[in-house]
Image (tube, coloured by chain):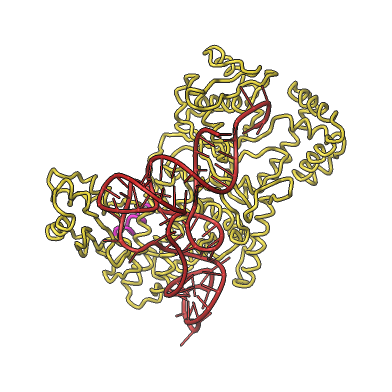
RNA sequence: GUUUCCGUAGCUCAGCAGGAUAGAGCGUUCGCCUCCUAAGCGAAAGGUCGGCGGUUCGAAUCCGCCCGGGAACGCCA
């Protein structure tokens, strides 16, 4: 049971433990507090079953003892039922407390404020140059960026690194293919698609003519030897690819602090290999150099191939060392598919064995594999959807809906983009990251129910109300004591935001924020539906409700941005 | 085979440092726009929480075994 963590629970657990004297700690009570299954029962509950052991009384008796002894102005009623002690919050003081808190902290409301002076490096997105940017890249990109935003929100300094796959034999292939069949104009015009087409053609033709592979290897060797012609082509291919990736990043509102990819670390590997040798960590196994990890129940980590060339772990180690030196990070996070878990566990261990003190600051954040409508992603069978196309489809659909529902709206394209892209991102980030996600296209592009558009629509709704309430001034406070259940429920959801942010960071789990957004929207829309806000005739109540709307607006806006969605004032 | 992740409503998913009747959304059926954006709100129907054991006052949640699915396991990244 998710324990609620606001100050109310804090003070309550203290006063409860005072009744016990030295027998039970306040923190113990705090951990035991929970939500009753229904609001009809109460707002907060203390199950007394565990206490019955230390106190040697039945839970029912303990609960009823409290019922009589406990007095707290924050609660309108305290009731013992069947071993549970149920508290009903005093709506006025509770709503006031929450709204005041949000109003005081504004957009900082919910921040753990514990990252000051600390640095987090995040390695995410990292597409392979000259390859399509498809739905499979959505996870790392969007989880990675959301984590970055969460850490920034907590006050950390964040370095977002796009560790481009910009080195390797595939470049020999593309260079070869380009020389044989490509043209400058077509690549400039076709962009990544053209590069991919060349790459695909290479593989096809190489089946007939294996000498092409030798040719490609040769071209890559030349590139490694800094051949000027090949280097020029290579840089150009990267440039072409990056141009396209950046379009997608822009739609998502993502910017990176560094695009240092694999090629950047090629000259930084020898030092690490030397250290491995000096520390006698390398073993020769079937010609390859490996670090034996049998003691840790893992297969060996390959450092050098039989031919002496480097491998993925070698590069990752060199990159980590570089980052530790350059950024002096407190945490270095890698967001990749769960399929790479072993790889990360292996080289993290190697880093530890090498004696680097920051080995325990490396974190792998894995996520499940994506399938589309229940079918595996497969480049060969063509079951691949480019992110660009998916976004485009979503934007088109939003545009059509907007034309129907709000034809007079200005700046429609930007809003359609924010909503369309938001729908896809929200859909992705609704799920626990570790689970394999089955991307149901119809659901991802749906705008009703638990969706991004629903959240953005609700946000726009709060904006619209606030705009229309401008004539009543903008310093709204909770002034009416005549507060009902809808208001209280809404305030309760708002009060959970700080602990949700904390868990999202602790668990590297943006979906916790997404889920919170849905709870908040549901509570607000219920409130909106049941209560008149601007049209409320009682002025005090009206101002109170506007204050609550403002608090919702602030928190919902913050939360949306934390999962890479844009705040849509109008929709 | 070894390791690891997952198995909750027809579908997509929440809930898992144990707690009172297992929750959403979609889909189905039915209500609500002379009123602040109906991309909304409400109601009904729908579940032996993969199975069997164990721990516990109490298990979807923790432990063990089994079944089913995915992924990773040496010269790709």
Q: Position of residue A31 (x, y in %)?
A: 27, 47
Q: Is residue A178 above or below residue A418?
A: above
Q: Nearer the viewer, residue A389 or A548?
A: A389
Determine if the magenta segment contains residue A558: no
Q: Is residue A524 above or below residue A428?
A: below
Q: Is residue A164 above or below residue A571?
A: above
Q: Position of residue A468 (x, y in %)?
A: 46, 70
Q: Colour of chain B?
A: red
Figure quadrant of the C terminus of chain A: bottom right
Q: Quadrant of residue A540?
A: bottom left
Q: Which residue occupies 51% across, 23% down?
A: A294
Determine if the magenta segment contains residue A103: yes
Q: Is residue A34 visible?
A: yes
Q: Is residue A284 shown left or right of residue A177?
A: left
Among the chains pictured, the one given yellow colouring is: A
Q: Is residue A152 visible?
A: no
Q: Quadrant of residue A178?
A: top right
Q: Nearer the viewer, residue A241 or A35?
A: A35
Q: Position of residue B3 (x, y in %)?
A: 50, 34
Q: Which residues are magenta?
A: A97-105
């Amino acid at each position: 049971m998710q324990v609620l963590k606001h100050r109310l629970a804090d003070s309550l657990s203290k006063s409860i433990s005072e009744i016990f004297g030295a027998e039970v700690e306040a923190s113990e009570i705090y951990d035991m507090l929970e939500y009753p299954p229904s609001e009809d029962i109460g707002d907060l509950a203390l199950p007394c079953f565990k206490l019955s052991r230390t106190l040697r009384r039945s839970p029912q008796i303990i609960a009823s003892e409290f019922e009589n002894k406990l007095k707290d102005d924050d609660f309108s009623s305290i009731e013992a039922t069947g071993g549970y002690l149920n508290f009903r919050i005093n709506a006025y003081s509770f709503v006031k407390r929450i709204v005041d808190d949000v109003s005081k902290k504004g957009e900082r409301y919910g921040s753990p404020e514990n990252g000051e002076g600390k640095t987090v490096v995040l390695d995410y997105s990292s597409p392979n140059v000259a390859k399509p940017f498809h739905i499979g890249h959505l996870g790392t990109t969007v989880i990675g960026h959301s984590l970055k935003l969460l850490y920034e929100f907590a006050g950390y300094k964040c370095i977002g690194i796009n560790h481009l796959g910009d080195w390797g034999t595939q470049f020999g292939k593309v260079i070869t293919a380009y020389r044989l069949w490509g043209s400058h104009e077509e690549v400039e015009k076709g962009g990544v698609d053209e590069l991919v087409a060349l790459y695909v053609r290479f593989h096809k033709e190489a089946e007939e003519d294996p000498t092409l592979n030798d040719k490609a290897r040769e071209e890559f060797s030349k590139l490694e030897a800094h051949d000027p012609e090949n280097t020029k082509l290579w840089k150009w291919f990267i440039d072409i690819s990056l141009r396209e990736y950046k379009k997608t990043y822009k739609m998502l509102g993502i910017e990176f602090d560094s695009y240092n990819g694999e090629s950047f670390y090629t000259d930084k590997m020898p030092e690490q290999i030397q250290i491995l040798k000096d520390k006698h960590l390398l073993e020769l196994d079937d010609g390859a150099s490996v670090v034996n990890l049998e003691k840790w129940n893992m297969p060996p980590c390959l450092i050098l191939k039989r031919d002496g060339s480097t491998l993925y772990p070698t590069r990752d180690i060199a990159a980590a060392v570089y980052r530790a030196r350059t950024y002096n990070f407190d945490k270095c996070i890698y967001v990749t598919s769960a399929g790479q878990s072993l790889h990360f566990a292996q080289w993290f261990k190697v880093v530890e064995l090498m004696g680097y003190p920051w080995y325990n600051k490396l974190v792998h954040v894995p996520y499940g594999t994506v399938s589309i409508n229940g079918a595996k992603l497969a480049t060969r069978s063509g079951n691949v959807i480019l992110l660009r196309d998916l976004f485009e489809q979503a934007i088109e659909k939003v545009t059509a809906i907007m034309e129907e529902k709000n034809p007079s709206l200005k700046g429609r394209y930007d809003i359609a983009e924010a909503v369309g892209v938001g729908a896809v991102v929200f859909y992705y980030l609704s799920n626990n990251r570790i689970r394999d996600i089955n991307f149901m296209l119809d659901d991802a592009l749906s705008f009703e129910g638990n969706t991004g558009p629903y959240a953005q629509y609700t946000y726009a709704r709060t904006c619209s109300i606030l705009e229309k309430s401008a004539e009543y001034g903008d310093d709204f406070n909770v002034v009416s004591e005549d507060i009902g259940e809808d208001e209280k429920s809404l305030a309760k959801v708002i009060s959970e935001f700080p602990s949700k942010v904390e868990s999202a960071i602790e668990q590297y789990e943006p979906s916790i924020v997404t889920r919170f957004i849905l709870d908040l929207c549901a509570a607000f829309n219920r409130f909106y539906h049941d209560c008149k806000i601007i049209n409320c005739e009682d002025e005090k109540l009206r101002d109170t409700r506007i204050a609550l709307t403002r608090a919702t607006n602030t928190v919902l806006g913050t939360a949306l941005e934390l999962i890479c969605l844009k705040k849509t004032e109008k929709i």
